Image (spheres, coloured by chain):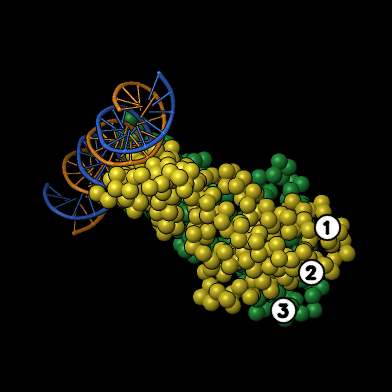
Chain colours: A yellow, B green, C orange, D blue
Amino acid sequence: MSHPARVTKTVLRTARKTSKTSRRQDYSSSTKRALLDSATALFTDHGYAGTSLDEVVAAARVTKGALYHHFPSKLALFENVFLRVQESTTADIEKAISSSKDPWERAQIGLEKFLEVCREPQFRRICMQEGPVALGHERWQEAEKAASYGIVQGAVDDLLTDLGGVEQLGEAFTAVFYGAIRSASEYVADAEDPDAASDDVQATISALLGGLRLLPTVG
Amino acid sequence: MSHPARVTKTVLRTARKTSKTSRRQDYSSSTKRALLDSATALFTDHGYAGTSLDEVVAAARVTKGALYHHFPSKLALFENVFLRVQESTTADIEKAISSSKDPWERAQIGLEKFLEVCREPQFRRICMQEGPVALGHERWQEAEKAASYGIVQGAVDDLLTDLGGVEQLGEAFTAVFYGAIRSASEYVADAEDPDAASDDVQATISALLGGLRLLPTVG
DNA sequence: TGAGAGTACGTACCGAGGGTATGGAACCCT
DNA sequence: AGGGTTCCATACCCTCGGTACGTACTCTCA
């Protein structure tokens, strides 16, 4: 019916000078983006197992033939959605962090931004909840290490070297701390008063981190 | 073939005085337990979506008719498996904790036991990984609050009242701390040297908690 | 410029798997 | 002793992920 290919002839000879890509390629990437968009929305609302590909293609106004032309499987579709969401949020956080140079301030800013991002249903559902199960714990962790986990890793390393003397715990510390932040974000997202909960959580984490500064040695 | 009902007649008239339950009821609960056992094993190995009911009933040497007689759905079967695993591990931890009265020592013992329990594939896969997605985040959290989360809640409350002055953060603190422990358990379970990783993690958490003692006030 | 190659889909179908309907054998109760 | 209930097997249905294949459109190159 309203398929893009049907209107090709009416506007055919205009382009080809301004844009390097052909109209056909534009259509292709457009339908691919439409598939990713509708999949993102549906995965966010109903989870991975809860959304059927029929729903996805219907929302994108194409058929399964189109979907399987762009993505080899449902899992691959999800992985693309996952990475796209993850990438955008990671960029947000890194941008926020870059405004400061002091490791403690960067940690503070990053934490605040992360708690904020985790309240967005997309990131929460797709990257935090469905991701590990759909992709498998291993693949998910791999992707995480390259994204938000990596940011935390860097922040923690800076903190620990700033403190001095506890570098040997870096890995374990990052793991524990990242879990604390994740849980904190869920707590905030579930709270009836997210702003107050966010304040409480930040106070808690600051208290825990602040305690570290007072420790002469660890072990 | 080897169905229990087939051997009924050969051993029929012996019971009924020693046990209150009929032989038929014994058989019924036995097949139910067999279904739960095989389902537990398969869910542990292949996850919720990855195991088919055909596999479950085949492993339990029954048919889908039997399964759907005892459980109304696949999800209900999983929930029963989930609760059974959760209950047993909770009992383990509570038993270990009960050996001490000092809140800091109890926290120490409980943490150690929890990290140990989280290395068991059953609890790890079913309760930590598949649980939240299969049951839904809400239902999972509800069950958690009544189980291991509840234990942590109690321990944290004891710690904070022992410290004094930071009770208003109790809820948030528990949430953050519980996430830290969960992540710690995954870190330990994934590590190539779990014992060393467990030591690192415990040192980290002790450091974070120990820092709290040095804080005069929080906020 | 037009014919073959490649792209971007649509349509029809298959098989696996969750769930249901039905029936029957064993058991319980009165 | 006969009906009701429990416990389970068999056969079937339906959804949904995935595949096979057809087709309209576009690009390339002789």
Q: Which residue occupies 64% across, 71% down?
A: A201
Q: Which residue is mark 3?
A: B219
Residues B82 and D5: in front is B82
Q: Position of residue B203 (x, y in %)?
A: 78, 57
Q: Which residue is mark 1?
A: A161
Is A181 situated above or below D14? below
Q: Could you tell me how far apart the alpha carbons at marks 3 and 1 are, in whole angstroms?
A: 25 Å
Q: Amino acid at mark 1?
A: Thr
Disc 2 and disc 1 in contact, CB within 8 angstroms? no
For this view, does B33 lie left or right of residue D23? Answer: right
Q: Chain of mark 2?
A: A
Give the foreground label among 3 and 1.
1
For this view, does A84 lie left or right of residue B96? Answer: left
Residue A99 sits in quarter: bottom right
Q: Amino acid at mark 2?
A: Gly
The tag earlier along the polypeptide, 2 or 1, is 1
Give the foreground label among 2 and 1.
1
Q: Position of residue B34 (x, y in %)?
A: 43, 42
Q: Is residue B116 visible?
A: no
